[in-house]
């Protein structure tokens, strides 16, 4: 059996790019399915590159780590509390005071900061789930497509 090295390299590069693109799309889908959609910033930051080193590298905003693993309870800085405003306005949690009156945006920001200080944030393991559930099928289909 004779293997044409240039043809193999071409097909291998096609394979790496198919896997990269399919995993990228699976990560985005799993993120949206598991975590919902807020601004789309994290989803839009998920990228891959397939290089000449026979590797596929995935990257995303640092926030992806916090979504994947959650965070332990922690105190937010004043700046971090201010960053909660956009989330509060988009999600508009139905929080009221003891008299049943809806909280202001600022009060909701402080309430959320208190919740994070007590409980941290919940993990949504979209990365691990993608690799555990989808990677075998993605690789199998990419091999079929690249080396047919």
Image: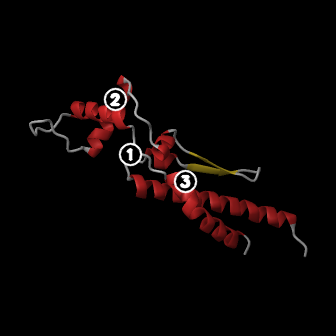
Label 2 to label 1: alpha-carbon separation: 17 Å
Q: Residue pushed farthest right?
A: 2
Label 3 to label 2: alpha-carbon separation: 29 Å
Specify which label sits upstream in the sequence, 3 or 2.
Answer: 2
- Where residue 54 sits in the image (x, y, percent)? 75, 53
Q: Of circles 3 and 2, which is in front?
A: 3
Q: Which residue is painted at 49% across and 46% down in the image? A: 68
Q: Which residue is painted at 14% across and 36% down in the image? A: 97
Q: Which residue in the protein does label 1 denote?
A: 39
- Where residue 38 sits in the image (x, y, percent)? 37, 47
The front one of 95 and 138 is 95
The front one of 121 and 147 is 121
Quadrant in which residue 39 is drawn: top left
Label of residue 128 in the image: 3
- Check disc 2 and report its element: helix, strand or loop: helix
Q: Is residue 25 among what the camera can see?
A: no
The front one of 7 and 67 is 67
Q: Which residue is painted at 61% across and 65% down in the image? A: 138
The front one of 118 and 62 is 118
Q: Is residue 103 left or right of residue 11?
A: left
């Amino acid at each position: 059996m004779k293997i044409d090295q240039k043809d193999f390299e071409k097909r291998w590069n096609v394979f790496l790019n198919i896997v990269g693109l399919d995993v990228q799309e699976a990560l985005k889908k799993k993120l949206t399915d598991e975590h919902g959609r807020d601004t789309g910033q994290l989803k839009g930051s998920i990228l891959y590159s397939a290089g000449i080193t026979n590797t596929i590298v995935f990257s995303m905003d640092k926030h992806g780590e916090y979504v994947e693993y959650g965070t332990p309870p922690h105190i937010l800085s004043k700046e971090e509390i201010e960053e909660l405003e956009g989330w509060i306005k988009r999600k508009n949690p139905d929080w009221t005071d003891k008299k049943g009156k809806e909280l202001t945006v600022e009060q909701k920001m402080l309430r959320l900061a208190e919740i994070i200080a007590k409980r941290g944030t919940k993990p949504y393991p979209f990365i691990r789930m993608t690799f555990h559930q989808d990677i075998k099928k993605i690789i199998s289909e990419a091999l079929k497509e690249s080396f047919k």
